[in-house]
Image: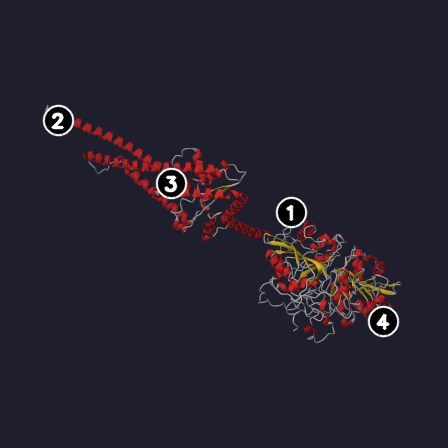
Amino acid sequence: MAPGKSRSSKRSSSSSTSYASTITTVVFLALCVLAIWMLTSNSVAPPQTSSRTATTKSNVKKDPPAFEDNPGDLPDDAIKFDEESNNDRKSQQDQKSESSSIGNAKDPNMEDGDDGINDKQETSRVKESAEEHEERQKENEKQISDQESQQTSDEENEENQKVDGDAKTYSQESENQKLGEDQQHGTEQQHQYVVSQDENPREFQSRISNRDQEPRLQQQLREDENRGNTQDSKNDEDQQLQKQQEEEIVKNEENSETRQKQQKQQEFQDVTNDEHPQSQEAEEDQESQQNKAGTQEVQQQQENDANQEAREENNTEGKPADSNSGESFPGGGNTVIPQESKESKKSWSTQAAQSENEKERRKEESGVMGSIYGYTWQLCNVTAGPDYIPCLDNEKALRKLRTTGHFEHRERHCPEEGPTCLVTLPEGYKRPILWPKSRDKIWYHNVPHVKLAEVKGHQNWVKVMGEFLTFPGGGTQFIHGAVHYIDFIQQSVPSIAWGKHTRVILDVGCGVASFGGYLFERDVLTMSFAPKDEHEAQVQFALERGIPAISAVMGSQRLPFPSRVFDIVHCARCRVPWHAEGGLLLLELNRVLRPGGYFVWSATPVYQTLQEDVEIWKDMSSLTASMCWDLVTIKKDKLNSIGAAIYRKPSSNDCYDQRKHKRPPMCKNDDDPNAAWYVPLQSCMHRIPVDETQRGTRWPEAWPRRLQAPPYWLNSSQMGIYGKPAPQDFVADHEHWKQVVKTSYMNSLGISWSDVRNVMDMRAVYGGFAAALRDLRVWVLNVVNVDSPDTLPIIYERGLFGIYHDWCESFSTYPRSYDLLHADHLFSKLKKRCRLDPIMAEVDRIVRPGGKLIVRDESSAIGEVENLLKSLHWEVHLTFSKNQEGMLSAQKGNWRPDTYVESS
């Protein structure tokens, strides 16, 4: 029996032990499951009390860095940091999972008798794990409670912020700043979300929440886990920052409009910064400025305006004229000022490049004038007095000439440095008489010269009548008036067709330019020129009358015009020795005459039988025949008792190829017929273009269609000056200047256009400004600078006229010649080559008292020009600047300084 009890007792004890072990295992497994669940829940976002709280927290959260929006664009440092954090968390979870699952896997080396010991160890471990888990759970609950209280505070702050005006700014310092100090070098970043007045707050909250995705939340929770002891202080900092923002909102309520503009610009700046990140130092400066008081925010706004203007300037550079875009000038004019395309310079040659033998350009000035505004002006101390033309009255240079056989003393000889003195006014000077009355009479004291009246009075050139000089309209070859003479030419060759087939002519040796003055009635433009010689003031008379004219001579150099541009060349008793030196001067006329154009020669050799005249006629007949000029007709005018021979230039090369003697010779292939700036004359002829795409193979369209029609030879494959294909560029420029003149110049510059007659465009491109003034009673001389694309042939092709010039030198005209000067982006270009004070002295010289100046240019150039004009006592009527571009309108007065320059 005893043995039986013993076995039964042992079985019972073993059974009890097994039962206890089973219970212990079940409890252990339950605790493990609970521990695993608690540990897992610790790495997941805590449940949020309500959707409203979640939304509020999302709104208050600071905008993540730009690279977090796209995980694929994370920087290497950020990727490395994120991987290390994930690995640490994963290793911790693996260790906890391993420790919690020890009871589930029994060591194979252990014996059955070790079960009791293992159970006790497992129970101890479970208790320790449970205590550890309970402590962690308490810490998590505390953190969740703190976060909920912070969310509640944020919700209240959001309700207060809704009181703000048109825009609300939500910002919070990034919570990973301290954790990533090494990566960010202590830089604090503050991003703002801007809600427009029309945006729904819920849509705004959704927009913000969409950007704050799971990677951002996980990073925050990991940070909370690692920095639990600093969370309270961090929340305090967040609350202080929130209070500071609320105070700033209250301060800025009085300037709501200014803040709205600043916020919109800041939003635009943020988008731009995504493409062009700022430097670390710039970000620090930006944040410090954003945290300053309201007065410093205004300064930040001004800086943003400057940055935006610079960006807009970069975006508009190289764009062609656009009549429907841009800011508004006063009066509604378009401020989109056309800029030359850099690429277009590869497609266009310049006069300077074409003229290989041109005069050497002046060297850059090393000295800079101190105070431009305070510059002391003095009167020019010269023999020419009120009629001073610096490049024609350079006595020092004229004394060095070795010969004057080719009228070198009448050509341009400019000073080494442009003069900065001012020209005196004639005693008793008055404002000029207006056109058309000025064609018949001018004030005597304005041009007090009587020699022409004494010598040519009987030929009805000019007469003195009291305080006036009168012009009956006659000339040496048309004593009875220019009108009859013009009709006489038309009747001699009906195909001339004044104002339709013939539009632009050159009058050589023009006298007082009555011929060109009366051709205005026939829609004909006449470029008149004569030398400054013993027939004193003849060109000055023309300009005072309101008739186009320049001081020039046919001497040793080419005329400053392109080849093949004048429809007719006219010479009435001009006393030019055309037949001398192998026809050197007549060959220059052949260069500028359009193929198929006419040469009208009204001179004594045509109709008189004196021995000298007979010899000249014989030589001229031989010369013109060898040049392949066709003598169309010889007509005599019985009223004036004169005759005229009318020649026509060939329109093909057939005659040139059939000549026997080849005299004059054909020019070499490398001789550019368009090169005209300080280029010596050549005793040769250039061939007629034969390619239909070349200029000169066809006659331009009849006037006025030719004014706005792109020339047939403009190639669409060639880039225009403003970046479009050349024909489109031409049309865009034409439309641009029509709008500018109509909406801005006519109404908003304070200019009485009825007082304007003589106009100069100091930097013409296609002649669009001159074309826009077509319906006014004005004429415009278009100046193409020698270092600009050579577009002067285009200007002539459309029925306008112009001249080559370099504004670092003086212009070949008398003082007080023009009523209005127009300069579009001229002075900013000239500043790179020469000083502005001599140029402004030249502007002051050629503008009449009461005359006007319109400048469109870069803002910096506008400011410098304005200061110079004020120092010259001009009245500045208007200055306007926007996006680094500006406009200026000014008027010259009668002021002259009291002192003269000391004689050298």
Q: In the rendered structure, are the residues bearing label 3 and label 1 in contact, judged by CB atoms less than 8 Å apart?
A: no
Q: First in sequence, mark 3 or 4: give its number.
A: 3
The residue where tag 3 is placed is 221
The residue where tag 2 is placed is 6
Q: First in sequence, mark 2 or 1: give its number.
A: 2
Percent across and percent down for residue 775 are 75, 52
Q: First in sequence, mark 3 or 1: give its number.
A: 3
**Residue 532 occupies quadrant:** bottom right
Percent across and percent down for residue 810 are 68, 65
The residue where tag 1 is placed is 324
Percent across and percent down for residue 794 are 70, 57
- Amino acid type at image mark 1: Asn
- Amino acid type at image mark 2: Ser
Mark 4 crowd level (few <14, some 14–19, many ≥20, 10 Å Cα): some
795 or 848, nearer to the observer: 848
Residue 285, compared with residue 426, is above or below; it is: above
The residue where tag 4 is placed is 614
Q: Is residue 681 visible?
A: no
Residue 849, compared with residue 27, is above or below; it is: below
Q: Residue furthest right?
A: 638
Q: Is residue 449 left or right of residue 829?
A: right
